[in-house]
Image (cartoon, rainbow, N blue to C red):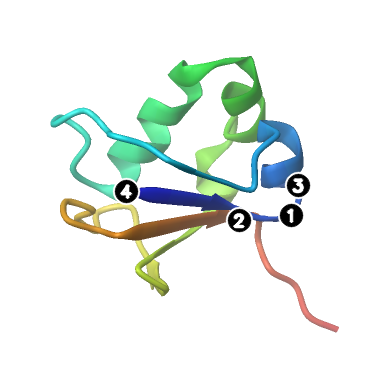
Amino acid sequence: MKLVYFSWVKDRIGLSEEDVDVPATVKTVADLLAWLPGRGANFADALSDPTIIRVAVDQEYAQADREITGAIEIALFPPVTGG
């Protein structure tokens, strides 16, 4: 699946996007946010507080319990503010 990173998440990870094969145990958004920090210090830094990370699965906002099996694209970004 393709992971796409935005704003300071992208800056801290050092990538704008990547294709990854997630382990079979990673089935939900919450599982993904728990697995990614183990990929390195840059991921751990960017995702140190997963409760503030917003996620879109195939371009639809998703909650932590959303299944990601079969997803084509998952985007991770910080909270969006307007003004």
Give the residue displayed 58% in from the left and 27% down from the top: 43
Tell me what residue is drawn at x 86 percent, y 84 percent.
83
Side (left or right) of 26 relative to 57 = left
Amino acid carrying label 3: it is Trp
Residue type highlighted by circle 2: Phe
Q: Which mark is residue 77?
A: 2
Residue 22 in which image quadrant: top left
Crowding around mark 2 (Cα neighbors within 10 Å: few <14, some 14 to 19, many 20+) is: some
Report the disc number at residue 7. Answer: 1
Mark before the other along the chain sequence, 1 or 4: 4
Q: Are marks 2 and 1 in contact (CB under 8 Å)?
A: yes
Name the residue that disc number 4 marks. Answer: 1
The Cα atoms of the two marked residues, 2 and 3, are separated by 8 Å
Identify the mark nearer the N-term, 2 or 1.
Answer: 1
Query: Separation of disc 1 and disc 3 at Cα?
Result: 4 Å
Q: Which amino acid lies under the numbered mark 1 shown in the image of this protein?
A: Ser
Where residue 75 sits in the image (x, y, percent)?
A: 49, 58
Q: Nearer the viewer's eye, disc 1 or disc 4?
A: 4
Q: Amino acid at mark 4?
A: Met
